[in-house]
């Protein structure tokens, strides 16, 4: 068993810097508590008084999950907080709780018929209108608490909140949220390249990761890290979000950037296909693409080709020896993988070794 790592004692500057970061980021989260009746919530959803952000519109609960939620409501079990953002015009955008709210509306005002319930078995297959009027009133009178972020909570703060609340859930991951929240020509390019057959062969992912936009996340990292790590603060989700947002704006102003970025991506993928025996995989038969390994090889190759374009046609570039080396395994290990120093280390490792060829 390896002894625990020894970490040097934090300096006064490091402690002060950490405290300043807490103060700065927490300024983005100002909120107040509220409480709404089921009747009011269902009515507001029906009348489209809540704004559902695009990254939540495509995620729909299965029928049995809707039934379990309504059963919890009928049993009087605690319902998780709803999270809203108070827009400058006074409307409320749903930051988290879209599925719960839409399920309430579908049950109270729609035709949602409950499935087979686990506890309230005698209510299985009921609709709201089939409940006694007294029970309907009790359901409508039930209140659910909410947290409302004020208008100063910026887009990134809302994204962070949604992502943190839903960590490990089936609702949405970072790549899915970026896809919905940052619609634009550059995001369209990312989606296009994520489905490129050559890239799919070089960077295999599990069926689960494919459905959760795993390849889109890899393409986003390729471009974002390849364009430089200025402003990166060991928070990849925030860095990638800001990058895609800014690139959507850049390509809107200069559409010629789209073919330029597309061509560079395909050029690098062709180079990796020719030079690296297993693409981004560890072995020929591997069915997954380690993210740190992908970042090292793809961005290291991109930088090397930018610096020495002749590498593209050079024959007999030997990479297998250092791909199998303890040094490469160390720089692509998971320990501190998102730290900017580790990120630069693994990218530069491949970059320099390719230039030595």
Image (cartoon, rainbow, N blue to C red):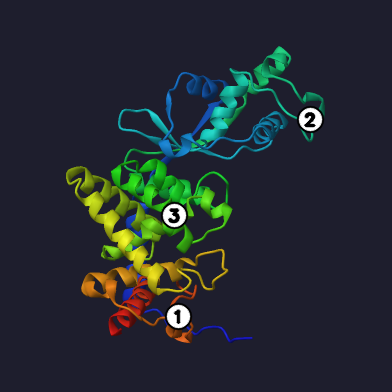
What is the C-alpha distance between the residues marked 1 and 3? Answer: 24 Å
In the image, residue 86 above or below residue 135: below
Q: Which residue is mark 2?
A: 120
Q: Which residue is mark 1?
A: 323
Number of marks in the rendered image? 3
Which is nearer the eye, 307 or 102?
307
**Mark 1 or 2, nearer chain start:** 2
Residue 300 lies, in percent from the top left, at: 33, 72
Q: Secondary structure at mark 2?
A: loop
Q: Nearer the viewer, mark 1 or mark 3?
A: 3
Q: Could you tell me if the residues under marks 2 and 3 are in contact, i.e. CB atoms within 8 Å?
A: no
Q: Quadrant of residue 54?
A: top left
Q: Secondary structure at mark 1?
A: helix
Which is nearer the eye, 297 or 158?
297
The C terminus: image quadrant: bottom left
Which is nearer the eye, 65 or 20?
65
Q: Residues within 10 Å of mark 2 (few under 14, many from 20)?
A: few
Q: Which residue is mark 3?
A: 197
Q: Residue at x 37, y 63 (%)?
A: 269
**Mark 2 or 3, nearer chain start:** 2
């Amino acid at each position: 068993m390896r002894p625990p790592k020894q970490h040097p004692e934090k300096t006064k500057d490091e402690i002060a810097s950490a405290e300043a970061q807490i103060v700065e980021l927490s300024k983005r989260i100002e909120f107040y508590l509220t409480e709404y009746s089921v009747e009011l919530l269902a009515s507001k959803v029906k009348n489209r008084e809540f704004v559902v952000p695009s990254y939540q519109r495509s995620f729909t609960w299965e029928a049995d999950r809707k039934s379990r939620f309504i059963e919890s409501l009928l049993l009087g079990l605690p319902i998780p907080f709803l999270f809203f953002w108070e827009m400058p015009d006074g409307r409320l955008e749903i930051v988290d709780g879209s599925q719960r709210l839409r399920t309430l509306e579908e049950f109270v005002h729609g035709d949602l018929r409950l499935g087979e319930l686990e506890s309230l078995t005698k209510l299985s297959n009921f609709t709201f209108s089939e409940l006694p009027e007294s029970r309907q009133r009790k359901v409508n009178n039930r209140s659910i608490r909410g947290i409302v972020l004020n208008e100063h909570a910026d887009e990134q703060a809302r994204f962070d909140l949604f992502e943190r609340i839903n960590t490990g859930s089936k609702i949405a991951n970072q790549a899915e949220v970026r896809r919905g929240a940052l619609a634009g020509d550059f995001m369209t390019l990312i989606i296009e390249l994520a489905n490129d057959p050559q890239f799919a062969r070089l960077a295999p992912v599990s069926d689960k990761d494919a459905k959760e936009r795993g390849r889109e996340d890899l393409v986003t990292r390729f471009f974002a890290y390849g364009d430089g790590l200025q402003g990166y603060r060991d928070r990849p989700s925030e860095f990638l979000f800001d990058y895609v947002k800014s690139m959507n704006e850049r390509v809107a102003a200069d559409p010629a950037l789209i073919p330029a970025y597309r061509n560079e991506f395909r050029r690098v993928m062709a180079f990796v296909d020719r030079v690296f025996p297993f693409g981004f995989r560890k072995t020929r038969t591997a069915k997954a693409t380690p993210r740190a390994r992908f970042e090292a090889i793809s961005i290291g190759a991109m930088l090397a080709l930018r610096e020495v374009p002749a590498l593209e046609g050079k024959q007999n570039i030997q990479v297998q020896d250092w791909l199998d080396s303890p040094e490469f395994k160390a720089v692509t290990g998971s320990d501190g993988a998102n730290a900017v120093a580790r990120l630069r280390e693994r990218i530069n490792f491949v970059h320099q070794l390719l230039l030595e060829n």
